[in-house]
Image: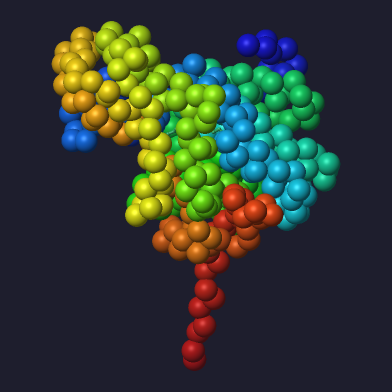
Amino acid sequence: MQLLTLTNLDRCTVKAIPPAHRVLSVNEMVADGLARTPKRLPPILFYDAEGSRLFEEICKVPEYYLTRTEKAILEQHAQGMVAGCAADIDLVELGSGSALKTRILLDALFAGGHTVTYRPIDISRSMLERTAAELTEEYADLVVEAVASDYDTGLAEVGRRRDRQKGFLFMGSNLGNFQHDEARDFLATVGAAMSPGDFLLLGVDLVKDQRLLEAAYDDAAGVTRAFNLNLLTRLNRELGADFDLQNFRHKAVWDAENQAIQTYLVSTVQQTVRLPEIDLRVQFGAGEAMHTESSHKYTLDGLAGLCREAGLSLTRTWTDDRGWFAVNLVQPVQPTPVSHRR
Ligand SMILES: C[S@@+](CC[C@H](N)C(=O)[O-])C[C@H]1O[C@@H](n2cnc3c(N)ncnc32)[C@H](O)[C@@H]1O
């Protein structure tokens, strides 16, 4: 990790806040998920240090069009996206990761003479510290106030400040990892942190040809496969489990009913796995699929409806020529003026 200089420390804070609501520990998540039928492991477990590194690799594989396409949309339209921003703005990014694409918006804001405080929220403190240090090195005028916590706690923290315009960012089609109701509740929580004039830039992946979608989540070089299997390596290390990675295969399939790519780890043999840290022995049948991630894809009408359900309004969309990905401007619904009769 790059060391912060003293000057940068003046402009860069990373505040770690314990989640406001009790969240399940890794042990509890795993015990709960493995007790279910069908078995599942929550996607938040992907992001240990190696998982975060592998996600960066995934973004570069030819089949994974999502990052490249979203980046191209931002590069083409960043000026328009920041056109309505106030002179002083807080840019609040949810699940910021390496903030690769954020730099495009920062460049556009600084080119337009704005004063920017970047407020990333990420559960991965190590990733957040690295990104915060890099950004303060790269942008001499940028102030970074990072929050290491979960989305809800981070939003409550940044939502307390109402004196400057807030532009929220939720990129990379992260919304797609939520089920429909979770996505609606998440958007409503973002809405609750907004003041009139605030906005959300929401990057989502769009419904498209099944073969393109499945290839993106099962690339020829096997990086998505390695990312999925890394979950088991993590459980072996952290829970003393004895998952034999040779006995599981990666599977990614289009689920037309739910408009999502579903990712699984499939047991190739009948086997028993021990997880001594949580005092568990788990049986897997040959061919049994354990769910690890849903990646929902959207139509623009569907997304507009979801925003409405969350009390928000989808007001503008920027997309690529092929219509594969969309960056959307989402704003609080303006209160309808009340007319008073005499
Ligand atoms: C797939 S990466 C996306 C990074 C970046 N936004 C992009 O578009 O490339 C997801 C990021 O969200 C973070 N994350 C996942 N679940 C989270 C949660 N519940 N609360 C806060 N951060 C979370 C992960 O640590 C990771 O850095």
State the residue at coordinates (52%, 31%).
219
Image x and y of residue 226, in percent: 46, 21
State the residue in front, 316 or 294: 294
Q: Quadrant of the N terminus?
A: top right
- Residue at x 71%, y 43% (from the top left corner): 72
Q: Can residue 9 be seen here?
A: yes
Residue at 35%, 24% (x, y): give it.
249
Looking at the image, residue 291 sits to the left or right of residue 206; the answer is: left
- Kindly give the residue lying farthest to the bottom in the view shown: 342
Residue at position x 48%, y 35% from top? 217
Give the percent coordinates (x, y) of residue 305.
45, 63
Total labels: the figure holds 0
From this viewpoint, is residue 145 visible? no
Q: Is residue 218 above or below residue 83?
A: above
Indicate left or right for 166 with 265 as reference.
right
Q: Position of residue 11 (x, y in %)?
A: 70, 24
| Image height of 288 relative to 323, above or below | above
Pick the residue in front: 27 or 286. 286
Would you identify the image quadrant in which residue 58 lies? top right
Question: Residue 75 at x, y = what percent?
Answer: 75, 43
